[in-house]
Amino acid sequence: MQAWQTLRSEYIMESPYGNFRKDTCALPNGNIIEDYYVNEYSDWVNAIVITKDRQLVLVKQYRQGGQDFFLEIPGGIAEKGEIYEEGITREVIEETGYISEHPPVWLGEFMVNPAVQNNKVVSYLFHEAYPGYAQDLDENEDIQLEIIPLDMMEDLIANQKITQLFTITSYYLAKSKGYV
């Protein structure tokens, strides 16, 4: 098996949220794909946040792409110059106000959709978290906190109340490592 060769690339759109690129690719079998489109995004970070009394901290917000409200774990992008642990700590504090005395526990790094996206999501766990700050949302964020008993999570997933894939994946990673 051989990798594709990129013959040309051009940007269709560039923005602070991501770029849209068109590649011309040569496949190992000799075929040429003239218009292969790639979304370029920054890497994302997210975290399962479990409180000292074994509650799960979730955020509910409207997502334009999905045209609905979604119940998720907190997350976002690591800002320029931040390592992932710094980025997720900042995001958890900003979105939820929660903090932990323990450093974030790395759960895994996964490609989002490598067929058409270049970024990955890096998942963490905060345990024994507690409210230490007020929410500090960006001007375009409207986030409602939802604190649920940890043992309700699988019912919410099974009943399609939580459908965001990164949230589900991170939860089961935390469970597989014995945190849940």
Image (cartoon, rainbow, N blue to C red):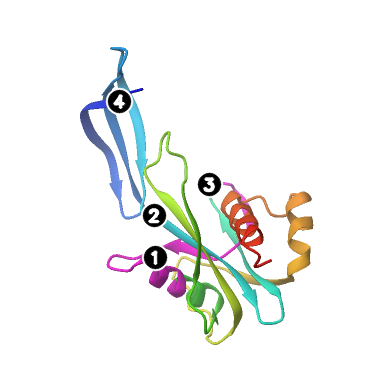
Provide the residue span drawn in magenta: 66-90
Categorize mark 2 by other alpha carbons within 10 Å: few (<14), some (14-19), many (20+): some
As measured in the structure, the alpha-carbon distance from the residue carrying label 3 to the one carrying label 4 is 30 Å
* Residue pictured at 53% horizontal, 51% vertical: 64
Q: Along the line of sight, which residue is nearer the eye, 89 or 103?
A: 103
Per the image, the residue denoted by label 3 is: 65
Q: Along the line of sight, which residue is nearer the eye, 60 or 38?
A: 38
Identify the element where label 4 is drawn.
Answer: loop
Q: Which of the two discs, 3 and 2, sits closer to the camera?
A: 2
Residue type of the residue flagged with mark 3: Gly
Which quadrant, please, contains the N terminus? top left
Which quadrant, please, contains the C terminus? bottom right
Identify the element where label 2 is drawn.
Answer: loop
Query: Looking at the image, how many numbered discs can be counted on the residues?
Result: 4
As measured in the structure, the alpha-carbon distance from the residue carrying label 1 to the one carrying label 3 is 25 Å
Residue type of the residue flagged with mark 4: Trp
- Residue 60, given in percent of the width and then of the height, sits at 63, 64
Per the image, the residue denoted by label 1 is: 84
Per the image, the residue denoted by label 2 is: 43
Sequence-wise first label, 3 or 2: 2
